[in-house]
Image (cartoon, rainbow, N blue to C red):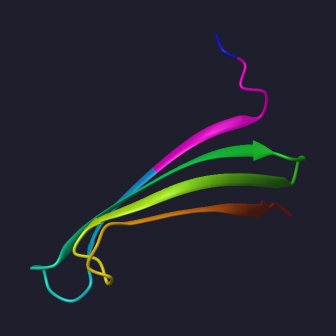
Amino acid sequence: AIDLAGLGLGVQGVIGTWDTFDNIHYGLSVGVAIAASESITVTPHISAVFGDTTSGDNEFTAGVNLGFGF
């Protein structure tokens, strides 16, 4: 067994369209949730959108999500 010590890997995907079903895009996001405390989670993530995007090209982004529990 591997002890992740408060870490969790999340993978999410999406299939969508902006206007018609002729312009379909696919998205994938991967993040590692890190428990900063019992009620705060910090999740750095990278995301990609492939296919017919608003810019016309594949798009890649990175960011950090903060989650708060009450």
* Number of residue marks: 0
Q: Which image quarter is the C terminus in?
A: bottom right
**Residue at screen point 9% across, 79% down:** 22
Residue at the extreme left = 22
Magenta segment includes 7? yes
Residue at the extreme right = 37
Residue at the extreme top = 1
Report the side of 10 relative to 56 (left or right). right
Residue 17 in which image quadrant? bottom left
- Can you say whether 44 is above or below 66 in the image? above
Residue 59 in which image quadrant? bottom left
Magenta segment includes 35? no
**Residue at screen point 15% across, 86% down:** 20
**Residue at screen point 65% across, 38% down:** 8
The percent coordinates of residue 67 (x first, y second) are 75, 61
The percent coordinates of residue 23 (x first, y second) are 16, 79
**Residue at screen point 41% across, 60% down:** 48
The percent coordinates of residue 1 (x first, y second) are 64, 10
For the magenta stretch, what is the residue range? 3-11
Report the side of 11 relative to 41 (left or right). left
Residue 56 in which image quadrant? bottom left
Report the side of 50 relative to 12 (left or right). left
49, 15: nearer the viewer: 49
